[in-house]
């Protein structure tokens, strides 16, 4: 098996702002694994909040190149377990590698990845489309630029209720709110009352990740469901979120890929938590991997490639929130 690493700097259509940062470009690592005429692809983007960069990911993978390339006839689960001890400090790199291996494995088996897992896609959820923080006028403009059935609205400003009030005047779409740790306990509880009246479905990660007492207070008193994101990073975090959140947003780059992501989703279901997978502004390579998990999800945020000025791959396509799979096996991607 041959390991190929590629670095990209993905340009966004608009400056993307959340409560803690703004970006115009998204650095991304693409991992390709080649074997017997087949190629599998995976992706992980950089993220300053999690202190990860593409050069560091590449260095970490280069250190274990021999171990990776010597792999023969292992299941994705066995491969992940073998590699994890060497990359447990860099789950983003592990994610890109795990995605690529799952893609390669399914292609070699002659199946789409979700078929290999025996998932059926009849009840797949629709994806939302994210509106980043900007002036109210600009946020209205971005929403009207792409009519969509579900919008995820980034908040964490002094005008949060005014923003949603103005957006609501323009559409009957479902709203989801992501404050990215930007609110306090009382602020969240109070905002939930106003936002519920404005047709908001749920709130995502309103408090700082480690404020577990605050999470429990909000969980008890919020009139809207609360979904964990920054508080749910790796597999062990799912159980911690029980009785503190109503659901969890699993990010594949944070947990180390599709293999542990599937386990996290199953654990959440056992605990009665709603299941969601979110993206980190990936290209269609990362988004197509997320699409394989759709049959197991209540909600999904997989609009990353739609936010790009130019994509670097083909794979799944999205039309008014509905995901259409590629005809190719594996995750169905092709690098352009």
Image (cartoon, rainbow, N blue to C red):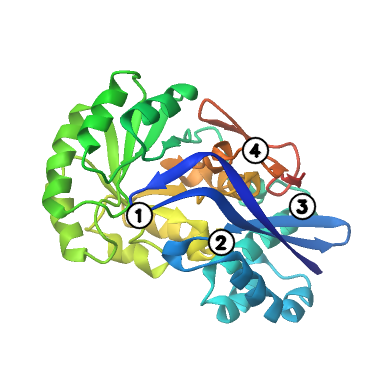
- For discs 1 and 3, the disc positioned in front in the rendered view: 1
Nearest the eye: 198 or 266 = 198
Q: CA distance from mark 2 to mark 3?
A: 18 Å
Q: Position of residue 64 (x, y in %)?
A: 69, 80
Q: Position of residue 38 (x, y in %)?
A: 83, 56
* Sequence-first disc among 1 and 3: 1
Can residue 171 be spotted in the picture?
Answer: yes
**What is the secondary structure assignment of the residue under circle 3?**
helix
* Sequence-first disc among 4 and 1: 1
Q: Which mark is residue 20?
A: 1
**What is the secondary structure assignment of the residue under circle 1?**
loop
Q: CA distance from mark 4 to mark 2?
A: 18 Å
Nearest the eye: 89 or 266 = 89
**What is the secondary structure assignment of the residue under circle 4?**
loop
What is the quadrant of residue 155 in the picture? Answer: top left
- For discs 4 and 1, the disc positioned in front in the rendered view: 1
Q: Which mark is residue 107?
A: 3
- For discs 2 and 1, the disc positioned in front in the rendered view: 1
Q: Which mark is residue 257?
A: 2
- For discs 2 and 3, the disc positioned in front in the rendered view: 2
* Sequence-first disc among 3 and 4: 3
Can residue 118 be spotted in the picture?
Answer: no
Q: Is 58 drawn above or below residue 287 in the view shown?
A: below
Nearest the eye: 181 or 124 = 181
Q: CA distance from mark 3 to mark 4?
A: 16 Å
- For discs 3 and 4, the disc positioned in front in the rendered view: 4
């Amino acid at each position: 098996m041959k390991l190929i690493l590629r670095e990209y700097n993905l340009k966004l259509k608009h400056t993307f702002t959340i409560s803690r940062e703004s970006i115009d470009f998204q650095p991304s690592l693409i991992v390709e694994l080649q074997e017997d005429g087949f190629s599998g692809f995976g992706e992980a983007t950089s993220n300053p909040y999690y202190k990860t960069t593409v050069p560091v990911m590449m260095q970490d993978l280069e250190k274990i190149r021999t171990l990776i390339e010597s792999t023969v006839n292992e299941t994705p689960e066995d491969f992940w377990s073998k590699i994890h001890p060497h990359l447990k400090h860099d789950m983003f790199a592990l994610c890109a590698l795990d995605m690529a291996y799952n893609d390669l494995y399914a292609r070699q088996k002659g199946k789409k990845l979700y078929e290999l897992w025996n998932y059926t896609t009849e009840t797949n959820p629709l994806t939302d489309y994210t509106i980043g923080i900007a002036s109210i006028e600009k946020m209205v403009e971005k929403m009207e630029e792409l009519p969509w059935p579900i919008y995820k609205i980034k908040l964490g400003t002094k005008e949060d209720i005014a923003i949603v009030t103005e957006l609501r005047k323009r559409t009957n779409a479902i709203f989801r709110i992501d404050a990215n740790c930007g609110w306090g306990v009382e602020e969240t509880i109070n905002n939930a009352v106003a936002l519920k009246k404005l047709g908001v479905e749920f709130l995502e990660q309103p408090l700082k990740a480690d404020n577990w007492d605050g999470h429990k207070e909000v969980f008890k008193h919020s009139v809207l469901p609360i979904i964990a994101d920054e508080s749910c990073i790796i597999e062990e975090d799912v159980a911690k979120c029980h009785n503190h959140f109503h659901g969890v947003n699993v990010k594949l780059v944070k947990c180390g890929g599709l293999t542990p992501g599937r386990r996290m989703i199953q654990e959440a279901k056992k605990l009665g938590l709603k299941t969601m997978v979110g993206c980190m502004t990936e290209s269609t390579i990362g988004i197509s991997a997320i699409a394989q998990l759709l049959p197991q999800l209540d909600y999904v945020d997989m609009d990353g490639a739609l936010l790009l000025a130019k994509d670097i791959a083909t794979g799944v396509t999205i039309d008014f929130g509905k995901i259409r799979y590629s005809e190719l096996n594996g995750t169905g991607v092709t690098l352009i």
